[in-house]
Image (cartoon, helix red, strand yellow):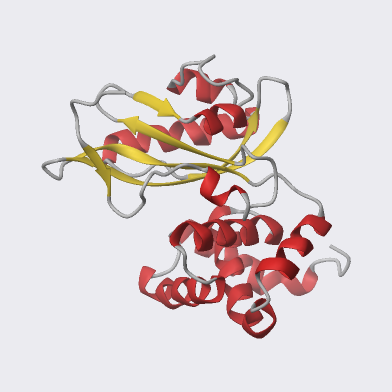
């Protein structure tokens, strides 16, 4: 780690993934942290992030080439483009993709990150989390709901809206979206229903999605009556 360069994130604090392991159902390595410096394209990752890619702690050095090599063939080009765009524009590296780990298992990963700045405020990279949202058993989710989130019954509407937002933005399913909300609830120490309300309340100010995405949705909205009922 380069201790000579003091960095900070705009809004995300990089902390141990252990604080949220009990909230996100799945393996103990379901969340890992990373940092990526734009100038020399240098990566750092936590042991948990390495485990998502199938590596033991300290056994592999992260690099753009290594990360892209583990991407699912259908996701490799979009991921490479996301990294290139981040470097050119000083933007966070975010998105959703599939990873084929060192053991050959396919994992579904969401990357959530923010800008990383030096002590003068200049953007020097991006830092955040790899979140493994590979499908889990429904009973595990139900156990979490019953034991830790009883307020869901009275707050279901806004939570479902927040899930819908995440599903559209990241292209994930409802189960995975719920796990992302759980993660941020525990990480920020904000009740899930409050977090969902805040998220939903801010979405209109973002001005909607890209024009291409809107065009695809327009087509769906105007033609969905022709879709097979069983689809």
Spot occupied by residue 230 in the image (x, y as percentages of width and height): 88, 66
Residue 136 x %, y %: 76, 49
Kindly tell me whether residue 92 is visible in this rendering: yes
Position above or below: 78 against 196 = above
Compared across the picture, whether 133 is left or right of 137 comes to left
Residue displayed at 33% across by 24% down: 41
Q: Quadrant of residue 94?
A: top left
Where residue 128 appears, x then y in whole percent? 41, 43
Res 213 seen here: no
Where's residue 145, x and y in %? Answer: 72, 67
The residue under the point 75% across, 69% down is 146
Apparent side of residue 116 relative to residue 138 in the rendered image (left or right): left
Of the 4 image quadrants, the one containing the N terminus is: top left
How many numbered marks does the figure carry? 0
Give left or right: position of 223 versus 139.
left
In the depicted view, which residue is nearer to us: 182 or 212?
182
x 46%, y 16%: residue: 61
């Amino acid at each position: 780690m380069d201790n000579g360069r003091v960095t900070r994130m705009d809004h995300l604090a990089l902390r141990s993934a252990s604080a949220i392991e009990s909230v996100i159902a799945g393996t103990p390595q379901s969340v890992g942290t990373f940092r990526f410096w734009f100038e020399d394209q240098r990566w750092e990752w936590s042991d948990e992030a390495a485990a998502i890619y199938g590596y033991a702690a300290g056994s592999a050095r992260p690099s753009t080439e290594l990360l892209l090599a583990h991407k699912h063939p259908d996701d490799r080009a979009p991921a490479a483009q996301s990294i290139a765009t981040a470097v050119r524009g000083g933007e966070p590296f975010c998105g959703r993709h599939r990873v084929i780990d060192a053991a050959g298992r396919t994992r579904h990963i969401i990357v959530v990150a923010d800008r990383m700045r030096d002590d003068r405020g200049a953007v020097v990279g991006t830092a955040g989390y790899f979140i493994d949202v590979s499908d889990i058993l429904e009973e595990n989710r139900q156990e979490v709901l019953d034991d830790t989130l009883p307020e869901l019954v009275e707050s279901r509407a806004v939570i479902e809206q927040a899930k819908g937002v995440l599903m559209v933005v990241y292209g994930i399913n409802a189960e995975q979206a719920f796990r992302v909300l759980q993660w941020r609830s525990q990480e920020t120490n904000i009740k899930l229903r409050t977090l969902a309300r805040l998220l939903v309340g801010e979405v209109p100010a973002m001005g909607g999605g890209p024009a291409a995405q809107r065009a695809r949705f327009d087509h769906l909205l105007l033609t969905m009556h022709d879709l097979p009922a069983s689809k």
